[in-house]
Image (cartoon, grey):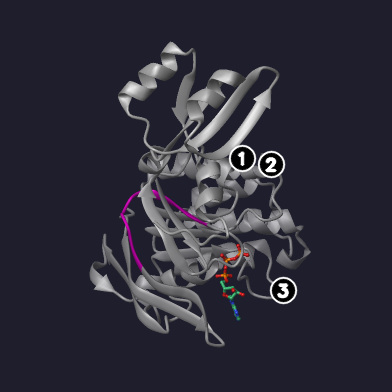
């Protein structure tokens, strides 16, 4: 049975030509949860994913993987016991040149101790991936789908999808999200989803890590993050009056109705005032918070 792994990074820095891609990162990813790794282009998501999977050794600091059948903390770099249990699916595919789908599947089956052949077969059918097809002749979206199949069927105790959806159309992405949730419910493990399609995946995430410029902006359970703000919906004039004085993250207007997303804690008395004024208060959208937290001001919290 798969057992979820815990991930820690201690003061991890990675530099390219002297410039930091990751800058003194301290993180702890709790086991058995779906973590969103969010950040704008170039924020360091892929570099972090590669360091977690042992593809790259940090220039400073340590990545530590522990728990499950690994027990005490170990570094993943050049550590076959750890890396067989950590599956990183990258957009690039990482498949042998000239290989057929069948060979990629056989390779994953040989390398992955928790490989589930039935699940692989079922997903290959659902994504319409023929075994005999040469991988390099697959369309962009189908290559991504193959990565998704290999990642899910590996049932690795730490599975990282680094923007694995690239090129996949909306129905295929939905198929991926549905398959991920269904299989995660059956076999809980630690999942990291690196993405900038925040609104699309937000309902699946339990924890969020936001990077900006290689630094940690925030790490938080999704619910706590959503509690950092609120959406206020109702007649435009009443919404404007109520939200005056708050930091506004987003506004949307439809006829006389307006929805304004604000930052800040709405204490119960304020919520009661809003209800009395005919306003509806809801949670803030993760996408709005993400845009705010990674705005070019470099705000950190
Ligand atoms: N192999 C490399 N050589 C030089 N610089 C690199 C290399 N890989 C990444 N970088 C730099 O490190 C920084 C972080 O890149 P990274 O790919 O980790 O970001 P990302 O958040 O995954 O971006 P994206 O969302 O665009 O994929 C960027 O400034 C990038 O240019």
Instruction: Locate the C terminus by quadrant.
Output: bottom left
Of the pair 284 and 171, the residue shown nearer to us: 284
Residue visible at 48% across and 67% down in the picture: 49
Residue visible at 46% across and 27% down in the picture: 282
Give the crowd class for mark 3: few <14, some 14-19, many >=20 residues within 10 Å.
Answer: few
Of the pair 66 and 39, the residue shown nearer to us: 39
Residue located beneath label 1 in the image: 174
Q: CA distance from mark 3 to mark 1?
A: 29 Å
Q: Is residue 280 visible?
A: yes
Please tell me whether residue 33 belongs to the stretch shown in magenta. yes
Do residues under tags 3 and 1 come within 8 Å of each other at their CB atoms?
no
Residue 62 lies left or right of residue 195; in this view the side is left
**Where residue 246 appears, x then y in whole percent?**
47, 37
Do residues under tags 2 and 1 come within 8 Å of each other at their CB atoms?
yes
At mark 2, the secondary structure is helix
Residue located beneath label 3 in the image: 98
């Amino acid at each position: 049975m798969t057992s979820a792994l815990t991930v820690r990074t201690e003061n991890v820095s990675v530099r390219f030509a002297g410039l930091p891609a990751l800058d003194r990162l301290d993180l702890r990813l709790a086991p058995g949860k779906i973590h969103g790794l969010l950040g704008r282009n170039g924020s360091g998501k892929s570099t972090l994913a590669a360091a977690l999977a042992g593809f790259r050794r940090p220039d400073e600091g340590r990545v530590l993987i522990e728990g499950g059948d690994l027990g005490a903390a170990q570094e993943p770099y050049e550590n076959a016991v750890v890396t067989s249990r950590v599956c990183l699916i990258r957009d690039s595919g990482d498949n042998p040149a000239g290989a057929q789908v069948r060979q990629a599947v056989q390779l994953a089956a040989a390398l992955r101790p928790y490989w589930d052949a039935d699940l692989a077969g079922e997903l290959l059918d659902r994504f319409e991936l023929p075994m005999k097809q040469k991988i390099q002749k697959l369309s962009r979206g189908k290559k991504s789908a193959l990565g998704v199949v290999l990642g899910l069927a590996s049932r690795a105790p730490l599975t990282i999808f680094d923007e694995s959806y690239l090129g996949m159309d909306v129905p295929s992405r939905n198929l991926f999200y549905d398959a991920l949730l269904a299989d995660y419910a059956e076999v809980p493990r630690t999942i990291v989803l690196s993405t900038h399609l925040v609104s699309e995946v937000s309902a699946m995430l339990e924890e969020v890590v936001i990077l900006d410029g290689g630094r940690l902006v925030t790490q938080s359970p999704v619910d706590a993050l959503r509690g950092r703000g609120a959406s206020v919906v109702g007649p435009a004039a009443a919404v404007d009056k109520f939200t005056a004085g708050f930091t506004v993250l987003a506004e949307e207007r439809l006829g006389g109705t307006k929805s304004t997303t604000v930052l800040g804690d709405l204490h119960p008395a304020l919520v009661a005032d809003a209800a009395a004024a005919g306003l509806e208060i809801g949670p803030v959208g993760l996408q709005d918070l993400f845009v705010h937290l990674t705005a070019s001001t470099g705000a950190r919290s």
